[in-house]
Image (cartoon, rainbow, N blue to C red):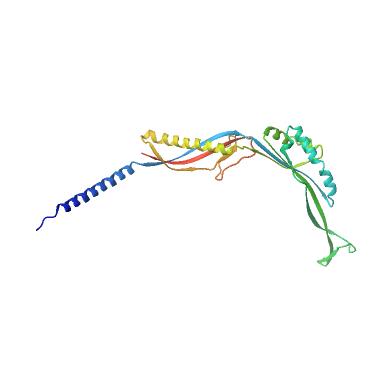
Amino acid sequence: MRPFPQAFWSVVVIGFTFVVLALIGIRGVQAVRAKTYIIGVTGSAVKTIRSDLAVWSFTVAYSGYDEYKSLYAKLKPVPQAVEAFLKAQGLDLEEVQVAASQVTQNVESREVDCKPVDDGCRTVVKDKIPLRHKTVSRTLYTVSRGFTVSSDKVDLVIKASNAVDALFDKDIVIGDSELKLIYTKLAELRLELVKAASEDAFKRAQLIAQPVGRRITMIEDGRLGVFQINAKNDPSISDVGNFDTTSLEKDVRAIVNATYRIE
């Protein structure tokens, strides 16, 4: 019987070596995995800001029945009076927008008793009793003009919105008044808060890992929550985010959910 050639035994040895190395590698990976853990934390950052833009919109309107020309005549001097009022409050007229006049009409109808000789009178017999009615209609006209003040003089706009009694004395009634206080540098602030919230999440993970002798090796996942813009000291949180436009001072909060690998 002829012995196996030396090349054959070389192939066997090499193959066996690969198998042993593969097993060692697998066990090594399993050992590493066995010592690897995941930790999830939430980081947050908040900054108090002051609104730097005020947008005040309001309407002046007059209403009356069956005739609107006199209403237009009453509305005509209003823009000049409003602009004079705003100027007296320290605001620039370039910051005031005056909308065109508008007219709306609403036809109102109701049933009234009538006599047989009246136009449109009709008779309805109910329980053998004749009832006479007719429909009377009239039109309610409303003429209006809208005003919008947009200014970075936030305090002056707030002051003006609280001083409209001066216009009431001139028979100018303010309606549909809405004051929005806005912060215009949110884009830059968001980047600042995302960085601060991420750093806060990392510090929290370290505080959990270090006491038990673990260290953070890498980040597995990171998710940015919606921003919360609330009135100062208001901790409210909404799934879709809050966006306060009524408070002069606001708290802007960013939240980051992060998952880290530790070993």
Name the residue at 70% across, 35% down: 157
Q: Position of residue 59 (x, y in %)?
A: 75, 43
Report the front residue among 198 and 185.
185
Left or right relative to 57: residue 199: left
- Is residue 216 something one can see in this rendering? yes
- Is residue 235 something one can see in this rendering? no
Q: Kindly indicate the quadrant of the structure image that contains residue 146.
A: top right
Left or right relative to 121: residue 240: left
Image quarter where the C terminus lies is top left
Image quarter where the N terminus lies is bottom left
Q: Position of residue 105 (x, y in %)?
A: 78, 53
Q: Position of residue 258 (x, y in %)?
A: 45, 41
Q: Position of residue 137 (x, y in %)?
A: 82, 57
Name above or below for residue 46 compared with residue 111: above
Report the front residue among 150 and 162.
150
Q: Which residue is situated farthest in the left direction here? A: 1
Name the residue at 73% across, 34% down: 92
Q: Which residue is situated farthest in the right direction here? A: 117
Name above or below for residue 142 compared with residue 171: below
Q: Kindly indicate the quadrant of the structure image that contains residue 112.
A: bottom right
Q: Kindly indicate the quadrant of the structure image that contains residue 30.
A: top left
Q: How many marks?
A: 0
Left or right relative to 259: residue 248: right
